[in-house]
Image: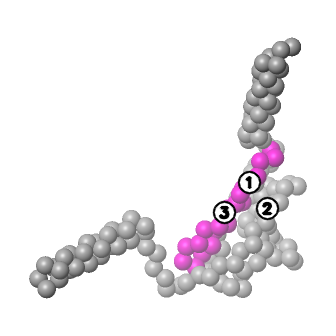
Amino acid sequence: MKPTMKKAASLLALFIAVCSDLVSSEGGEGEDQTGSVDVSGTSVTLTCPLTGTVSDPGSTTWQYKEEEKKIPDTDGKTQITLQTYNSTNNGLYKCSNGNDHYHFYVKVKVCESCVEVEVVPMIGIIFADLLVTAGVAILVYYWA
């Protein structure tokens, strides 16, 4: 084989290896899954990324802390909401589905009298404040 043919063959082999690696890494059962924790007021919502098996889609169970206390009324739910959450509820939570387990370490500070503000109104308030400040600065500059 000529050197250019060897280079072309090597590049082709490398291209095939990279493509096969990309195809094998998409999806699949070995894919990392991520749960989520949402806080709103004094409630905390945990979402388990594990899905049920084909034969038993609602087989998810939830447990709390090292003692593995089962959380009541959560069987089969992939999402649980802990109402009136406080610092005594901080700790390790686990959702299980068959042999699969997902752990959450939750340490959250909640506020009973806090007001949640959406992003868009907050941006509007900041923008309006900047305009008023710039207007006052221009007035002071021209009339001072």
Spatial distance from mark 1 to mark 3, Cα to Cα? 10 Å
Which residues make up the magenta segment?
29-49
Q: Are marks 2 and 1 in contact (CB under 8 Å)?
A: yes
Amino acid carrying label 1: it is Gln
| Residue displayed at 73% across by 65% down | 74
Nearer the observer: mark 2 or 1; the answer is 1
The crowding category of the residue bearing disc 3, from other C-alpha atoms within 10 Å (few below 14, some 14 to 19, many at least 20), is: few
Is residue 135 rendered to the left or right of residue 108? left
User: Would you name the residue on which mark 1 appears?
Assistant: 33
Residue 48 in the magenta stretch? The answer is yes
Counting residues from the N terminus, which is met first, the one under dot 2 or under dot 1? 1
Residue 75, position in %: x, y? 76, 62
Q: How many marks?
A: 3
Numbered circle sitting on residue 36? 3
Q: Earlier in the sequence, mark 3 or mark 2?
A: 3
Relative to residue 50, is residue 69 depicted above or below? below
* Residue 32 to residue 107: above or below: above
Residue 102, disc: 2
Q: Nearer the viewer, residue 142 or 35?
A: 142
Q: Report helix, strand or loop for mark 3.
A: strand
Is residue 82 in sight in this rendering? yes
